[in-house]
């Protein structure tokens, strides 16, 4: 963050502003130009000091400076946050080994890049299917081995981070855990990339501060995922906030993924919202795909069939090209077996 002093600010003004910053445990760095002085603010959460200068007559403006875009690189070379658009796809829940393999092959052959699937499921009702837990992780590891697709899966408790990260190329923090600060710190201490979903009723600022919890522990490989928020609207499961994509482009250097499946709750809306997400500049989308949606143990109504997913991919390729990006290269079948969590 930088504080731009007004032209004509005196030495005493500059010293006073620096003193206020330093009193909050942050460091300052002066750049003295001919006309005005710019004070760089360095340290944890430098933006926290911005409100201390809204009435200061010698301060012109306080500006958040974003560093270079974060590009997350997976073990197989796939990047998230650069010029490539990535497609994460797979079932809501891992329901068994066979169905997961069937889906994973369809995702890869349809043009998907990363296999999604929940083993630990945060279900609203304690009586709903809770996921296969560690058995689900084993199925994910096997699907990864047989298809070469990197895997993303959710972790719900700090004590399971190590176990989940052994299998996952990206660990997912679900919407309901966006403000589970112990969990955020724990994944922050682990080197595995993290995808942080936006909470059901959380503001963009709260979401970015949750990302800071991970970053502050030394894990800089953080991806944001918008999955729809609660509004008064009930026709869709959530209201997908597409505007957050260009907004986050201004506010943050982290990659942004859109999840149109949870964002809408209706499979018939998923394709249009995925196209819109990429048109708005998203670094990728996460789409639920199930071989037989009507038999799914969770989120069948919002899941695409493999055929629908495969038909959508060429459309997403064209939209990516229209905004100066390109879909990441397909994962080649001959990379199977070689894939090892990076
Ligand atoms: C999921 O992606 O598996 C999931 C549970 O989504 P969310 O946390 O966004 O509800
Ligand atoms: Mn789901």
Image (tube, helix red, strand yellow):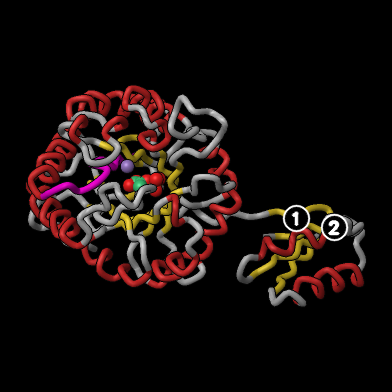
Foreground: 323 or 177?
Answer: 177
Question: Label 2 near label 1: C-beta < 8 Å?
Answer: yes
> Which quarter of the figure has residue 47?
bottom right
Q: Is residue 35 in view from this perspective?
A: no
> Which residue lies at the image location 43% right of the left edge and 46% below the top edge?
225
10 Å crowding of disc 2: few (<14), some (14-19), many (20+): many
Residue 12 colored in magenta in the image: no
> Of the numbered discs in the image, which one, if any, rests on residue 59?
2
Horizontal arrangement in the rendering, residue 10 relative to residue 310 (left or right): right
Residue lying at 37% horizontally and 24% vertically, measured from the top left: 269
For the record, the magenta segment spans: 85-96
Secondary-structure class at tag 1: strand
From the viewer's perspective, is 94 left or right of 80?
left
Residue 190 occupies quadrant? bottom left
- Residues 165 and 282: in front is 165
Queried on whether the Cβ of the residue with tag 2 lies below 8 angstroms from ligand 1, the answer reads: no
Tell me: 55 left or right of 326.
right
Identify the residue under disc 1.
62
| Residue at x 52% of width, y 38% of height | 230
Residue 92 located within the stretch drawn in magenta: yes
Q: Position of residue 139 (x, y in %)?
A: 13, 55
Q: Position of residue 99 (x, y in %)?
A: 11, 42
Q: Quadrant of the C terminus?
A: bottom left
Q: Position of residue 168 (x, y in %)?
A: 25, 59
| Residue 338 drawn above or below residue 216 | above
- How busy is the neighbourhood of tag 1: few (under 14 within 10 Å), some, or many (20 plus)? many
Note whether residue 256 is visible.
yes
């Amino acid at each position: 963050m930088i504080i731009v002093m007004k032209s004509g600010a005196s030495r005493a003004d500059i010293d006073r502003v620096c003193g206020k910053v330093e009193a909050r445990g942050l460091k300052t760095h002066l750049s003295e130009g001919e006309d005005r002085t710019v004070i760089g603010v360095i340290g944890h959460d430098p933006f926290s000091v911005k409100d201390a200068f809204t009435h200061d007559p010698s301060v012109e403006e306080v500006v958040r400076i974003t560093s270079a875009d974060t590009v997350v690189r997976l073990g197989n070379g796939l990047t998230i946050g650069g010029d490539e658009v990535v497609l994460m796809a797979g079932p809501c829940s891992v329901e068994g080994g066979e169905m997961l393999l069937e889906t994973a092959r369809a995702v890869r052959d349809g043009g998907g890049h990363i296999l999604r699937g929940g083993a630990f499921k945060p279900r609203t009702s304690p009586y709903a299917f809770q996921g296969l837990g560690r058995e689900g992780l084993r199925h994910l590891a096997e699907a990864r081995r047989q298809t070469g697709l990197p895997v993303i899966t959710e972790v719900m408790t700090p004590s399971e981070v190590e176990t989940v990260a052994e299998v996952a190329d990206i660990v997912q923090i679900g919407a309901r855990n966006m403000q589970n600060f112990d969990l955020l710190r724990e994944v922050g201490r682990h080197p595995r990339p993290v995808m942080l979903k936006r909470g059901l009723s959380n503001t963009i600022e709260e979401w970015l501060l949750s990302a800071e919890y991970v970053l502050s522990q030394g894990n800089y490989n953080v991806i944001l995922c918008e999955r729809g928020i609660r509004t008064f609207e009930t026709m869709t499961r959530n209201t997908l906030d597409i505007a957050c994509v260009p907004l986050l482009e201004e506010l943050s250097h982290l990659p942004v993924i859109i999840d149109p499946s949870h964002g809408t709750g209706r499979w018939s809306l998923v394709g249009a919202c995925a196209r819109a997400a990429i048109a708005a500049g998203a670094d990728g989308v996460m789409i639920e795909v199930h071989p037989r949606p009507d038999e799914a143990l969770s989120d069948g109504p919002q899941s695409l069939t493999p055929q629908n997913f495969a038909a959508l991919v060429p459309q997403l390729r064209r939209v990516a090209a229209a905004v100066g990006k390109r879909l990441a290269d397909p994962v080649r079948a001959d990379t199977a077996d070689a894939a090892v969590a990076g």
